[in-house]
Image (cartoon, grey):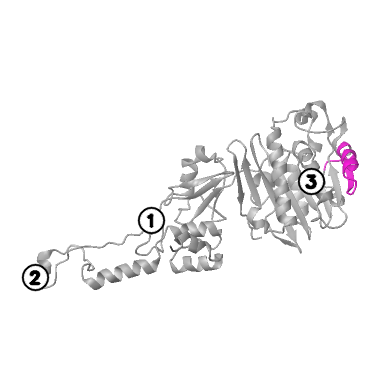
């Protein structure tokens, strides 16, 4: 029995994993830990598989690129084979500018504050909105600054797939 | 190795015993070891719930005398003063490893600012609220920052709203927020983890430059912190 995809990824170095991310258009991984990179890759189908499937379908003639608004009648008039199936590719500029066909969509990213941490469906939301949304759950201070992928950001920053968000928790004062 | 323990309250007293034991007996620790206990405060009866002292008096002096008897291979010194801008250059010298166990951000800022001008120094700073807290490591090597200073990601330390104990009135000193012994123990414990990882095992401290914990949530989370571009 072959190794699982995760096991295969875990055998690779961080540099190799980052290279795979780059090939697959996954951004924001340069500062991530290995487990985070693997998680991101696990959410993404390998491009080879996607390309192979598409190629097979196109070769069999079952799937044709579909134009919007064309009907069988128009196709007949134009003396071409009518479109029987349509395949759409959807990606969100807000959440993942580099999305490719076959990429899985996820709406959850890692959000933390102090010792509290979890995955929350906040892609496409601003950091300021997330601070309000998770204030009670993560005990986010009203004045807490947001950091995305280790860098401080404004409250208007819109979260994208692959981001990690941390709200800075004040240091403990007593001792 | 020159170790300084600044502050001998709930965290400091929890730290001294295991740290001195390790420094005396571990084969990982090379050469002579000096440990300076620094605190201008006196141990009083009200402290008995969280702090371990054998008698009443200056905390640094009592703890140093007690530790000298138990850890005779260490060169233990007592400095019965609070760290301030006048004495810090004499106490924290090049190559020191400083454990900050104080109970105010004003003192943390004084130490962090002093360290930021040094060539080689390691600061391990712990602090807590009632059930949660954090530990930071600020390391400088060869005149460069390996991890962020204590103030870089913490405006509350950069611009402290509190004052150092020397500047406080007697009323302020007597009004202390309630603390939990177990939380103090956790801070001291994580400070030992950080020391072991960064100093003994020489792990990259960026990966645990700040460690948060919450004993109520049963959670500990290390965070990656890189020095800010200056």
Which of the chains bears the disc numbered 1? Answer: A
Q: Is A64 above or below relative to B185?
A: below
> Is residue A29 shown left or right of residue B18?
left
Q: Secondary structure at mark 1?
A: loop
State the residue position of label 2: A77
Residue at x-position 55% and y-position 64%: A14
Which of label 2 and label 3 is nearer to you?
3
In the rendered image, is residue B161 in sight? no
State the residue position of label 1: A105
> Is residue A99 shown left or right of residue B24?
left
| Residue A96, horizontal then vertical, whole percent | 41, 59
Pointers 2 and 1 within a single chain? yes
In the rendered image, is residue B29 in sight? yes
Q: Secondary structure at mark 3?
A: helix
State the residue position of label 3: B19
What is the quadrant of residue B156 in the picture?
top right
Q: Magenta span covers which residues?
A: B62-82
């Amino acid at each position: 029995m072959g190794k699982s995809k995760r096991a295969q990824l875990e055998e690779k170095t961080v540099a190799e994993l980052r290279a795979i991310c780059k090939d697959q258009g996954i951004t924001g991984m340069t500062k991530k830990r290995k487990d985070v990179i693997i998680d991101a890759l696990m959410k993404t189908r390998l491009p080879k598989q996607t390309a192979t499937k598409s190629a097979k379908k196109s070769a069999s003639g079952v799937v044709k690129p579909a134009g919007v608004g064309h009907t069988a009648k128009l196709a007949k008039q134009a003396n071409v084979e009518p479109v029987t199936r349509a395949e759409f590719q959807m990606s969100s500029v807000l959440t993942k500018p580099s999305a490719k066909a076959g990429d899985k969509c996820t709406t959850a990213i890692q959000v933390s504050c102090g010792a509290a941490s979890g995955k929350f469906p906040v892609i496409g939301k601003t950091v300021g909105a997330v601070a309000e949304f998770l204030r009670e759950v993560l005990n986010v201070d009203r004045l807490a600054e947001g950091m995305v992928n280790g860098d401080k950001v404004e409250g208007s920053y819109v979260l994208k797939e692959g981001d990690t968000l941390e709200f800075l928790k004040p240091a403990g004062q007593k001792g | 190795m020159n170790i300084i323990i600044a502050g001998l309250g709930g965290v400091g007293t929890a730290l001294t015993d295991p740290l001195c034991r390790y420094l005396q007996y571990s084969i990982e620790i090379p050469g002579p070891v000096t440990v300076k206990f620094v605190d201008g405060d006196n141990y009083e009866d009200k402290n008995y719930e969280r702090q371990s002292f054998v008698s009443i008096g200056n905390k640094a002096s009592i703890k140093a005398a007690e530790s000298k008897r138990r850890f005779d291979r260490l060169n233990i010194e007592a400095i019965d003063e609070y760290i301030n801008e006048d004495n810090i250059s004499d106490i924290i010298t090049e190559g020191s490893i400083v454990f900050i166990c104080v109970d105010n951000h004003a003192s943390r800022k004084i130490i962090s600012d002093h360290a930021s001008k040094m060539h080689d120094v390691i600061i391990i700073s712990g602090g807590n609220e009632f059930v949660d807290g954090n530990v930071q490591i600020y390391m400088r090597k060869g005149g460069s920052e390996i991890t962020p200073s204590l103030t870089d990601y913490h405006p509350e330390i950069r611009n402290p709203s509190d004052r150092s104990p020397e500047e406080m009135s007697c009323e302020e000193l007597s009004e202390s927020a309630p603390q939990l012994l177990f939380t103090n123990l956790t801070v001291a414990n994580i400070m030992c983890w950080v020391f072991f990882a960064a100093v003994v095992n020489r792990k990259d401290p960026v990966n645990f430059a700040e460690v948060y914990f919450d004993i109520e949530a049963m959670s500990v989370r290390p965070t990656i912190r890189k020095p800010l571009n200056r």
